[in-house]
Image (tube, rainbow, N blue to C red):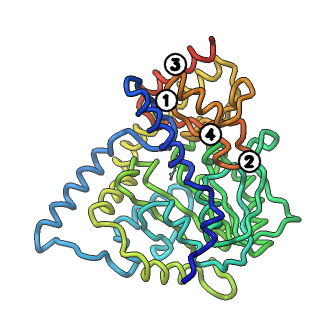
Amino acid sequence: MKINSNFLNLKDSYLFATVGRKTTAFKAAHPEKKVIRLSIGDVTRPLAPVVIEAMHRAVDDMSRKETFKGYGPDQYCYGYETLIDSIKGSYARKGVSLESGEVFISDGAKSDLGNILDLFAPENTVLVPDPVYPVYVDTNVMAGRKILYADANLENGFLPMPDFSVDADIIYLCSPNNPTGAAYTKEQLKEWVKYAREKDAVLLYDAAYEYFITDPALARSIYQIEGAKECAIEFCSYSKTAGFTGVRCGYTVVPQALIREGTSLNKLWARRQSTKFNGVSYITQMGAAAVFTEEGEKQISENLGYYRENAKIIANCLDELGIFYTGGKNSPYIWLKCPNEMDSWQFFDYLLENANVVGTPGSGFGKNGEGFFRLTAFGTKEDTLEACSRIRALLLK
Ligand code: MLT
């Protein structure tokens, strides 16, 4: 047998695994120090009460033979209609109308972003912004695809625009962006939709952070742009929106209008999912179905407000220190320029050793991330305040 030797072209370890290993080693060497993690974007607020109540009810359903559930309904690849309807409702409030068969429930955006590649031939060329969420690059390296990069930098506000002289078949966009926090306006996305249509390409649009958007000029969904249903797949998640990082639930929209080489990508995805996936647990789906109810939206917006407040605390600290940053406004990530000309990993070590605060080195997201650093607003308020006071004390020295 032969292994998939493309794996040998990957970096030794996944970015957040490297950060985790370094943090664990530091803690083992300094057990007396309280290390604050503002690195991986993992949430700290408990689930909303409506979600918990719905999950309790679902557990009770599982305890009675009359209401017990086995596999989910196969009509929508094991997604329950109540959940799909609530997602359609959330889209309708953004002015986007979807059919039930266009919404696929999964265990999160990360899995779907990787798995969607089953639909595309290995010889396709991929275009990703740099810096970027490492999953887009690593999953394509595993498949041996050619990858092109669109530079995201200070000059373009970390929002690269399409270069029509470059040909690409699969394009990744993430807005609000991970890691930079920058978010595209509807006007800017029109250009990307135009580009994808002109190249007969498919846009893979990661909207995992869309619930952090407050500015109405910014797009909440790629389908707010005319013509996007013919060229884009959208990935969403309950992780950051509703605190589901430990529960696992997401949804992907593959429009019926998305046809390539005379074949419906919706049909291909349904075929792929029904073959390789058995759906998300009933209890999880019932919890998720409570998120986009009126009460659910009210409750999750309290948690989103809490994280926005953390972002403001970090931003104020950086303002005081005169450190350049982007993000933090329509995004839970703050992307800052490393002080004193340090490179990303130097600043990571400096901060870990001297302030016992962990962030994510920008260079881990791509070459344009070198010299930058990402902090997350998903920590507790207490930790965020404490981390900022340590950073302030260290950098004012
Ligand atoms: C991040 O920190 O970039 C995210 O938490 C990673 C993820 O969502 O998989």
Residue 367 disc label: 2
Q: Earlier in the sequence, mark 3 or mark 2?
A: 2
Q: Amino acid at mark 3?
A: Arg
As rendered, which of 339 and 312 lies closer to the eye? Answer: 339
Q: CA distance from mark 1 to mark 4?
A: 23 Å
Q: Amino acid at mark 2?
A: Lys
Q: Nearer the viewer, mark 1 or mark 4?
A: 4
Residue linked to disc 4: 361
- The x and y percentages for residue 161 are 79, 54
As rendered, which of 63 and 38 lies closer to the eye? Answer: 38
Q: Secondary structure at mark 4?
A: strand
- The x and y percentages for residue 385 are 47, 22
Q: Is residue 131 rendered to the left or right of residue 191?
A: left
Residue 263 disc label: none
Query: Does 363 sit above or below residue 249?
Result: above
Quarter of the image for residue 199 reads bottom right
Residue linked to disc 1: 309
Q: Amino acid at mark 4?
A: Pro
Q: CA distance from mark 3 to mark 1?
A: 18 Å
Q: Earlier in the sequence, mark 4 or mark 2?
A: 4
Q: CA distance from mark 1 to mark 2?
A: 30 Å
Residue 390 disc label: 3
Q: Residue at x 59, y 78 (%)?
A: 119
Q: Amino acid at mark 1?
A: Glu
